[in-house]
Amino acid sequence: MPLYEYQCPDCQESFEKLVRSSAAADSVSCPTCGSAHPRRKLSTFAVKGSGRSSSAGADSAPSCAPGGL
């Protein structure tokens, strides 16, 4: 079951919701104000990048490869 992040345009509340299907994702309502129109946010883990910061050198970047390669 995917976990989606939402933000309500009416009350600006951010929240997460586990949904069973894409049809269920369309029927999510804000838990704070009850608005039926929250917007799904782009999750930061879904963004593809190099994993390196421009201010950090290659030696300071953590690695999950065996042996720190």
Image (cartoon, helix red, strand yellow):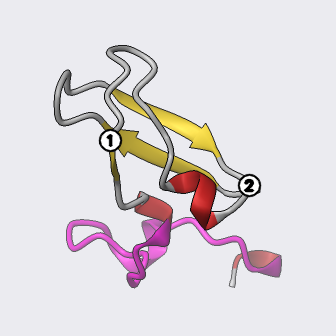
Q: Give the percent coordinates (x, y) of residue 16.
A: 52, 37
Q: Give the percent coordinates (x, y) of residue 35.
A: 31, 28
Mark 1 Cα-neighbour bin, 10 Å: few <14, some 14–19, many ≥20: many
Q: Main secondary structure of the magenta part?
A: loop
Q: Quadrant of the C terminus?
A: bottom right
Q: Is residue 32 above or below residue 16?
A: above
Please report the residue visible at 46 percent of the width from the left and 46 percent of the height from the top. Answer: 5
Front residue (pair 45, 58): 45
Q: Is residue 63 above or below residue 69?
A: above
Mark 2 Cα-neighbour bin, 10 Å: few <14, some 14–19, many ≥20: few
Q: In the image, what residue type sits under mark 1?
A: Pro
Q: Quadrant of residue 18?
A: top right
Q: Is residue 57 left or right of residue 18?
A: left
Q: In the image, what residue type sits under mark 2?
A: Arg
Residue 20 - label: 2
Q: Give the percent coordinates (x, y) of residue 44.
A: 41, 60
Q: Is residue 56 above or below residue 40?
A: below
Residue 23 within the segment the image draws in magenta: no
Mark sitting earlier along the chain (1/2): 2
Q: Give the percent coordinates (x, y) of residue 23.
A: 59, 62
Residue 38 - label: 1
The Cα–Cα distance between marks 1 and 2, rounded to whole angstroms, is 17 Å
Q: Secondary structure at mark 1?
A: loop
Please report the residue visible at 40 percent of the width from the left and 84 percent of the height from the top. Answer: 50
Please report the residue visible at 46 percent of the width from the left and 20 percent of the height from the top. Answer: 31
Residue 60 within the segment the image draws in magenta: yes
From which residue to which does the magenta span run?
A: 46-66
Q: Quadrant of residue 52?
A: bottom left
